[in-house]
Amino acid sequence: MIGLVDCNSFYVSCERVFQPRLRGRPVGVMSNNDGCVIALSTELKALGIKMGTPAFELQHQIRRGQIHLLSSNYELYGDMSARVQDVLQEFSAGVEPYSIDEMFVRFDGLESAQMLEHARQLHDRVRQYTGIPVCVGVAPTRTLAKLANRAAKKIAAYQGVCVLQSDSRETQVLLKKIELGDVWGVGRRLVERLAVMGIKSAWDLAQANPKEIRRRFSVTLERTALELRGIPCIEMNDFHEPRQRIMTSRSFGKLTDNLDEIREALRQHGQRGAEKLRSQGSLARAVYVFLKTNPFREDLPQYSPGAVVELSRPTDDSREVLRAAGHALERIYRPHYLYQKGGVMLLDLIAADRQQLSLLDTPQTDAERQRSATVMSVMDELNQRMGRGTVKLGTPSPGAAWHLRCANLTQRYTTRWDELLVARTK
DNA sequence: TGGGGCGTT
DNA sequence: AACGCCC
């Protein structure tokens, strides 16, 4: 059996572990740049506020102290996520992280009676050891486990834990009750297209002819349909596999047509990307750069260009990535547009240890490669030890508009000695 | 009015 | 490359 453990309002829950006064209050956590609300406590949801609401729309409620919105503190959430995983590891036959707040767990050799008890114990222990509330769904396939989790979250009677056997009456009832759009892998578009065929619930999709689903939609949807019947056909991407592409992008913080500003922001992204590349031990063979105007400003001309530049040889050297990104930018930049966002993507990645030696390599290029590796590893080490951005290529101006907005950031309670929670006795 | 990632066509 | 999906 497969379990899906999903942390409730994860970012909000992390904050509440260290700020008990936030418990029972309407609390939200904002996306990067304090742009929109991406995590909501139940109390905030009860006020009718939705995931994705722009933060600026809530300003007066914040000022009146009716709601609390925090900037996202990914260092804290990442560490809390690792703690949850550690607990799961102890209580399962293996953990496969799926996202920062969701983990699949494997259960081997448990009878169905024991299964429920075990899942409940896991649910309680995570809460006890980490302070994070979770819901647990268990089923024979990942898609059904996701669905069971949904039920555990939404239907109070389950009290946070739902175990489904594939052919049970209970599973059938749930499949009929759950909306199609709540099924893992079925988004807005598919809901519309499936409705035309009379497929309106998860049950309908489970009953549909898989071959026909494949023909009219895709192999992925066919797999989803089969999984709803209890036939496993979705494997997890191994979390330890290196990424196949690496993207770094960010909104500029304000609309801008200033090429210098844009260049600086993209240099930053290029360096971050190259860092990620080195940390996973890969080399890139191409760099993609894109720009985007603000699609919500229908009154302004729109332009969303992108360009790929091939690298002369696979590399993880920030300087070569930046050079390529610079060329790409020259190609796509047009004045008089107000750009909202830009980014750098590293493509065509290969493992560094499988680099093909080129016939054109000379002792000089070999020495160059050595030197490059040394410079980069010194940079990475300094940045890791002294904090991100200690050593940078180029000279970014400190007040640049694209620096991240995060006005309401909490402490990194669990990963920084100087930001520990202080307890006072009085 | 986020910032990633992946797969399919 | 565009589009769809996920969080």
Image (cartoon, coloured by chain):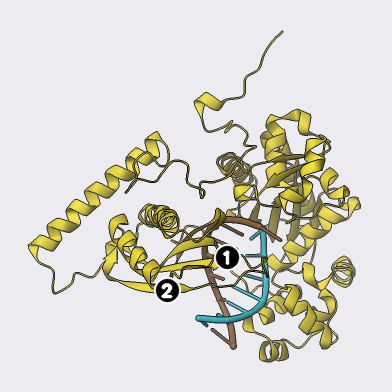
Chain colours: A yellow, B brown, C cyan
Q: Nearer the viewer, residue A261 or B4?
A: A261
* Kind of element beneath mark 1: loop
Q: Nearer the viewer, residue A352 or A41?
A: A41
**Amino acid type at mark 1:** Met
**Amino acid type at mark 2:** Ala
The answer to whether one can see residue A313 in this image is yes
Q: Which residue is at the far top?
A: A426
Q: Position of residue A57 (x, y in %)?
A: 77, 50
| Quadrant in the picture for the N terminus of chain A | bottom right
Question: In whole angstroms, how far apart are the C-alphas of marks 2 and 1?
Answer: 32 Å
Q: Which mark is residue A236?
A: 1
Q: Position of residue A327 (x, y in %)?
A: 33, 68
Chain identity of mark 2? A
| Quadrant in the picture for the C terminus of chain A | top right
Q: Which residue is at the far front?
A: A336
Marks 2, 1 in one chain: yes
Q: Which mark is residue A307?
A: 2
> Considering only vertical position in the picture, is A42 above or below A276?
above
Give the crowd class for mark 2: few <14, some 14-19, many >=20 residues within 10 Å.
some
Please tell me in which quadrant of the rendered image residue A20 appears.
Answer: top right
> Considering only vertical position in the picture, is A355 above or below A20?
below
Q: Nearer the viewer, residue A274 or A129?
A: A274
Give the crowd class for mark 1: few <14, some 14-19, many >=20 residues within 10 Å.
few
